[in-house]
Amino acid sequence: MNSADIAKHLRGLRLRARLTQADLAGICGLSVPSLAKIENGTGTTTLATLLRVTDALGARVEITPGPNEEALPTKGLPRGRRS
C-alpha cells in the first residue's frame, strides 16, 4: 500500500463514519488543512499523527514484512503494540 492508497483509505473510513474533516480534525487535535493534506496525499505526517487519526476512526496501522523480508520477532514487545 502506498501513501496515495493510505490517503484514500483514511478518507473512506472518515466518510463511512459520517464525520466531516472538521469533526475528525477536532477529535485528533489537528487543523482541518492538515487533515485535508493527509487525506489528499499532498502532505506528510508523523506516525504519531497517523495513529491518532486511525485510532479515532477505529482502525489500526499494521506493518507486515514485504516479500523479501522476514518477520521480526515480537517477543518482549508490549502486548498492545504487536500489530
Image (cartoon, rainbow, N blue to C red):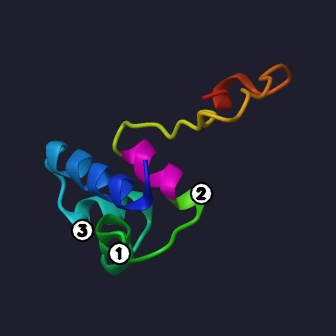
Foreground pick, 72 / 55: 72
Q: Residue at x 70, y 22 (%)?
A: 79
In this rendering, position of residue 69 left or right of residue 64: right
Task: State the residue position of label 2.
Answer: 48
Q: Which residues are magenta?
A: 50-56
- 52 part of magenta stretch: yes
Amino acid bearing label 1: Lys
Q: Dot 1: what SS?
A: helix
| Disc 3 to disc 1: CB gap under 8 Å | no
| Disc 2 to disc 1: CB gap under 8 Å | no
10 Å crowding of disc 3: few (<14), some (14-19), many (20+): some
Amino acid bearing label 3: Ala
Amino acid bearing label 2: Ala
10 Å crowding of disc 2: few (<14), some (14-19), many (20+): few
Q: Residue at x 18, y 53 (%)?
A: 19
* Residue 57 location (% of width, % of height): 34, 44
Whichever of callouts 3 and 2 sits on the residue coming sooner in the sequence is 3
* Residue 4 location (% of width, % of height): 35, 61
Task: State the residue position of label 1.
Answer: 37
Task: State the residue position of label 3.
Answer: 22
Q: Is residue 69 above or below residue 49?
A: above
Whichever of callouts 2 and 1 sits on the residue coming sooner in the sequence is 1
In this rendering, position of residue 12 left or right of residue 81: left
